[in-house]
Image (cartoon, rainbow, N blue to C red):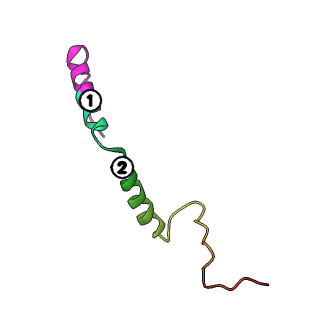
Amino acid sequence: MKPDAEMIEGPEAWKRFQGVMKNVLAVPHAMIQKRIEEHRAVAAKNPNRRGPKAKLKPSVSRAPDV
C-alpha cells in the first residue's frame, strides 16, 4: 500500500505546479499525435484486446458486382 503523499501548500506548491505545466506544454502537438498513432497501431495488433474490433476495409483487388 502506498504511503500518504506529502501535502505541499503555499508558494512552493505553486512553483512545482508551474514547473510541471511548463514541461507538459513544451511537448509539440505533432509529437503527441505521433505517439497516439503509434499506440493505436500497437494496440490494433493485440488479438486479445477487449471491446469492439476495428472494421476491416474492403480490399482494393476485389472486383465490384456489376
**Image-quadrant location for residue 21:** top left
What quarter of the picture does the C terminus occupy? Answer: bottom right
Type of amino acid under label 2: Ala
Kindly identify which numbered label has been placed on residue 30: 2
* Coordinates of residue 16 in the picture (x, y in percent): 22, 26
Q: In terms of depth relative to the viewer, which is nearer, 14 or 36?
A: 36
Type of amino acid under label 1: Ala
Kindly identify which numbered label has been placed on residue 5: 1
* Coordinates of residue 33 in the picture (x, y in percent): 40, 51
Left or right: 55 as drawn, with respect to 19: right
**Which label's residue is closer to the chain start, 2 or 1?**
1
**Image-quadrant location for residue 35:** bottom left
* Coordinates of residue 22 in the picture (x, y in percent): 26, 32
Q: Residue at x 29, y 42 (%)?
A: 27
Q: Is residue 26 magenta?
A: no
Which residue occupies the extreme right position in the image?
A: 66
From which residue to which does the magenta span run?
Answer: 1-18
Q: Measured along the vertical axis of the image, is residue 54 above or below residue 8? A: below
Mark 1, other Cα within 10 Å: few <14 / some 14–19 / many ≥20 = few
* Coordinates of residue 1 in the picture (x, y in percent): 30, 40
Q: Residue at x 22, y 29 (%)?
A: 19
Q: In terms of depth relative to the viewer, which is nearer, 54 or 66?
A: 66
Q: Nearer the viewer, mark 2 or mark 1?
A: 2
Q: Secondary structure at mark 1?
A: loop
Q: Is residue 4 magenta?
A: yes
Q: Secondary structure at mark 2?
A: helix
Which residue occupies the extreme front position in the image?
A: 66
